[in-house]
Image (cartoon, rainbow, N blue to C red):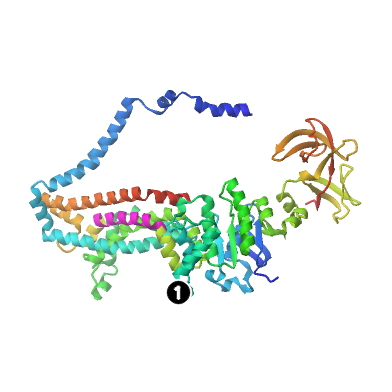
Amino acid sequence: MSDASLAADALPVGRPTGHRTVARGESAVVRVVLIGVGLGFLALFLALPLAIVFLEAFARGWGAYRAGIADPDSLSAIQLTLLVAAITIPINVVVGIAGAWAVAKHEFRGKSVLVSLIDLPFSVSPVIAGLVYVLLFGAQGYLGPFLKSQGLQIIFALPGIVLATLFVTFPFIARELIPHMQALGNADEEAALTLGASPWRTFLMVTLPNIKWSLLYGVLLCNARAMGEFGAVAVVSGKIRGLTTTMPLHVEILYNEYMSVAAFAVASLLALLALVTLAAKTFLEWRYADEIVATRRH
Amino acid sequence: MSVLLQIDNAARQFGSFAALKGVSLAIEPGELVALLGPSGSGKTTLLRLIAGLDFLDGGRIAFDGVDGNALSLRDRRIGMVFQSYALFRHLTVRDNVAFGLRARPRQERPPSAEIDRRVRDLLALVQLDGLEGRFPSELSGGQRQRVALARALAIEPRVLLLDEPFGALDAKVRKDLRAWLRDLHSRTGHTTVFVTHDQDEALELADRVAILHQGRLEQVGTPDAIYDHPATPFVCSFLGETNRLPVEVQGGQAWLDDQPVYAASTTNVIGPADLYVRPQHLKLDRPDVSPLAGVVEFVRRHGAIRRAEVAIRGLSKRLDVDIGGEIAPSHGERVGLRIQKAHLFAAA
């Protein structure tokens, strides 16, 4: 018995090192071709479009760029976008944490239905979502007459845009939190409770600190999508210039009117947002890698 | 002595699986009690029920005579050390230990200088002075466990509960911590209940051992009592290695194949029975004068002792026999065996 196991142990040690490199690697030509195809694809479909956005935006210099953004309609689109994000993100944080908490920490009937509901916005076309809201809240919709009598306007106004954005961005935070919370388990919360902490204190002092980085990550993704959403918002907003146009809608309007410098100037802001999101995400992963490893370890 | 923790007929059902089927146990102040059993025996379920982290489906758990259902988790004052330790990873060792004191409502909370003093004392008690500022990820497994213990002790618990306290540690640390915990218990006198699946750990540490099997309590008693007088075949075979011989009890004798192998004068078992013999209670003898004789098939070393495996005619399983100071028989040698001590249970 010992002879056989010794022989098996000795095999990898005794194997000449030169043999290993050959076994691992493809020939130099194959490697260059594969890496070249990969990099070429990235350059053509990701880097180049991004560069063109900025090139076009500055095609007629800094002055034209500034004029494009300083236009009152552009400024109001930027304001509206920021406002929508500022309303939807806190709501999504609260609802996302509550949903993830329910799914990750508890067992109950209909849990799989809840998970499917959380994922629903991913599988429904945003345009459909927008149309549903128009059907529901619009002037000819089911609730339209009632809302009108109450003096509430939802469609073609801020509430509709917020609703559509909420629908589209809802899964981001919950989806980010659920696997993390499931991996963490309940032991920390149980420990806090046996130590006499109230449920609220347990949430603030134990649960929240444990999930803070995945929560921040979810907020980043949610924010990027909230500011960039086009389809659902296009349907419910009515695209009233200077009133209900968010940045992506405004870019489209400008582009359709052949004002390409202004269109790309506003687009460059959205692209910048994407870059900042990417940088923040990379920073989080780099800076807190240790903590994430520690989290996974015990 | 008064009863600190009274468990009456505790039952817990998970779907169609009955984790606990009516367990009763009384724990006195200052006791160190082990809940011992294989996986799935319900020992961790019982511990969680005592801690108030799970709900009884039947029965009652009372603390100092007060029904546990009437007590909040805080009022139960249970110091629990989790198997994974469940240290708060974003807090330092100091803040982990202080957590329970700081979580108290304002009017019961000690002033912060007092909290600091108590944390220092507790860290000295668990020999972690100087590590106050570390984070859990910067500690070894044994150190983490002692932080978890200090954190549980900080709330001045009525009962200390330890879930598999040595489960995640390597063998050497395990041994050291075992002795250290026994010593700590004798110094501080906390009533302690710990869960383990390791018989040696339970027998070495505990004042009393409660053995659980398939959701039922098989036997409770001091380590000596349960080891020397197991109440059920399960306890007997779980607490150490045993040989099982199918015998027939007639006239105060256990018979194996018409040979009287063991004088069973004190038992009230009659008819077919199982005789459980530990390897150390089988002694080698001359084959011609022994009722039990067989052929040595293997001799192996088990730590400090050598163990022979003896094939007996009519038995499908070889008998394990511990060999002490005497000269070991050689392979193929014919030997006789004498049973010094055994436990008889009516055949199932």
Magenta stretch: includes residue A213: yes
Residue B103 makes an appearance in the image: no
Q: Residue A222 vs residue A55: left or right? A: right
The residue pinned by badge 1 equals: B106
In the image, B101 versus A143, the foreground residue is: B101
For the point 29% across and 68% down, the residue is A142
Q: What percent of the width, then of the height, locates residue A191?
A: 51, 61
Bounds of the magenta segment:
A210-229
In the image, A89 versus B65, the foreground residue is: B65
In the image, A268 versus A263, the foreground residue is: A268
Q: What percent of the width, then of the height, locates residue B282?
A: 81, 43
Q: What percent of the width, then of the height, locates residue B261?
A: 87, 44
Mark 1: give few (<14), some (14-19) or many (20+) Cα within 10 Å: few
For the point 79% across and 31% down, the residue is B330
**Secondary structure predominantly adopted by residues drawn in magenta:** helix
Q: Is residue B154 above or below residue B138?
A: below
For the point 30% across and 58% down, the residue is A129
For the point 51% across and 57% down, the residue is B147
- Image quarter (top left, top right, bottom left or bottom right) of the N terminus of chain B: bottom right
Magenta stretch: includes residue B209: no
